Image: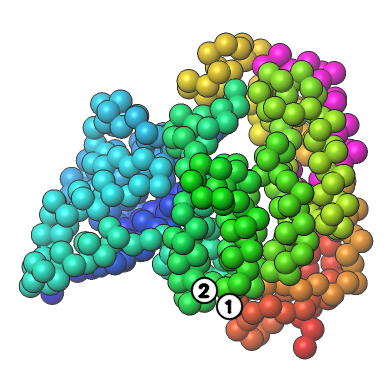
Amino acid sequence: MLKTKKYHLWTIGCQMNEADSRHLASQLETIGFKSTPEPDNADLVVLNTCVVRQQAENKIYGRLGSLKTAKEKNPDLTIGLMGCMVGMKEAPTLKHRFPYVDVFMPPSDSTPLINYLERHHFLQELRNQEKSDRRLRDKIQDAKNLLPMNQRGNAVTAFVPIVLGCSHACTFCIIPYRRGVERSRRPNEILTEINTLVSQGIKEVMLLGQIVDRYGADLDQNESLSGLIRKIHEIDGLERIRFLTSHPNWMTDDLLYTVEELDKVCPHIEIPVQAGNNNVLANMRRGYTCEDYCKLIDRIRTIIPGATINTDIIVGFPNESHDQFNDTYQLVKDIEFDKIHISKYSTRPKTIATRKMIDDVTDDEKTERRNIIDEAQYEILERKNKSLLGQTLEVLVENKKKDRWFGRTMHNKLVFFDDPRNLLGKTIHVKIGKTSPYSLIGDPMN
């Protein structure tokens, strides 16, 4: 009897990459592969890559170096590279640089790997195992036709891409060059996917897009994110809906009223500001001013009282002075975000900033600026979370970590608690007994 083939899938980057990896995993398992957490035990290793920041790209190079050694020891090992490093046009260059990689896959497109497996020895062994070419062909076709809706394990939440690519072209961003132009998926396809996910036990979906608010702008129908959310809200068995990432220019009052009106939609808004100075925002080509952004925050908090507001900030953008950075620091203090994703600016190939601007802020200065924002945010979150001490919060239980259950509130607060029962996927009430800036600990209420 032939041994089961194993795959190892390593993912870095955004939720879109997580969604792509889950889809690929489902395809591989459809044709008979089994997952392994150890790359040394795998017959197939796939790296799903991110190149939004240089730090992420460096990690991938390290992994590729290790895989080269593994390939030399085991020539039968198949290696796949997918995601933003491959992009829409980079495969020939990467093949020359990394000749030991067998398959290159653009973002959200695993077809090259399935085709490769169909042609090569993996599926020849499966063909012998199946004793029927027709059965194998059916499995392969099932894998190719599989929508990204099958979840491995006991997943409670799922990422659902609804807008692929981006056409906005901020000067710092590599995404349009690697994921292509903006494309909205058809609503019927999205609804079919979510219905299937719910039938598999999914309780919460996160709708994804580089600018998720622009959903439907490229479709010939009168579609919008708020309209799509209203359709998703009607799905029986689904408990929560989230969406990210928003752009200040495209967040409408209609969308905000939809969030406030529908009880399944979490009052959790991800809306990057990137900088708190108008000159820096203009250099980034963000299309709004700090004043515009602050007015939007006021509208969000008026329409959705108590809404959680998360943001992204880049420090050390080309020509960012100390005074301009201080404007960003003051914005953070004034708005009091619930979470900030802070990154140091790094040059990215083909972007406008790399081609036309000089990266003139030192790495030490970038690190110092990031730490200053981190410290300010720590104090804000410490105070905000302390206000929750003694409160009872509704938590959707997602999984266990070190034998302790964890889940999130509708406002995206991370909560840990102990309980001997199997509460996976359950919505329970937890009384908060201890707080920290980044998580809460409590006791479940019977």
Q: Would residue 32 be found to the left or right of residue 171 on screen?
A: left
**Quarter location, residue 407:** bottom right
Q: What separation in Å lies between label 1 and label 2 (alpha carbons)?
A: 8 Å
**Whether label 1 touches label 2, CB < 8 Å:** yes
Check if residue 328 falls in the magenta segment: yes
Q: Would residue 311 be found to the left or right of residue 150 on screen?
A: right
Decide whether the magenta segment is chiefly helix, strand or loop.
Answer: helix
Residue 149 % position (x, y): 43, 64
Residue designated by label 1 = 236
The numbered dot on residue 198 is 2
Q: Amino acid at mark 2?
A: Val
Q: Residues within 10 Å of mark 2 (few under 14, many from 20)?
A: many
| Region rendered in magenta | 318-340
Q: Amino acid at mark 1?
A: Asp
Q: Would residue 369 be found to the left or right of residue 86 on screen?
A: right
Query: What residue lies at 65% left-to-right and 85% top-to-bottom?
Result: 420
Query: What residue lies at 57% left-to-right and 73% top-to-bottom?
Result: 235
Q: Would residue 133 be found to the left or right of residue 425 on screen?
A: left
Q: Residues within 10 Å of mark 1 (few under 14, many from 20)?
A: few
Query: What residue lies at 92% left-to-right and 61% top-to-bottom?
Result: 387
Check if residue 432 falls in the magenta segment: no
Query: What residue lies at 14% left-to-right and 51% top-to-bottom?
Result: 120
Camera-side mark, 1 or 2:
1
Where disc 2 sits, the SS reads helix
Where disc 1 sits, the SS reads loop
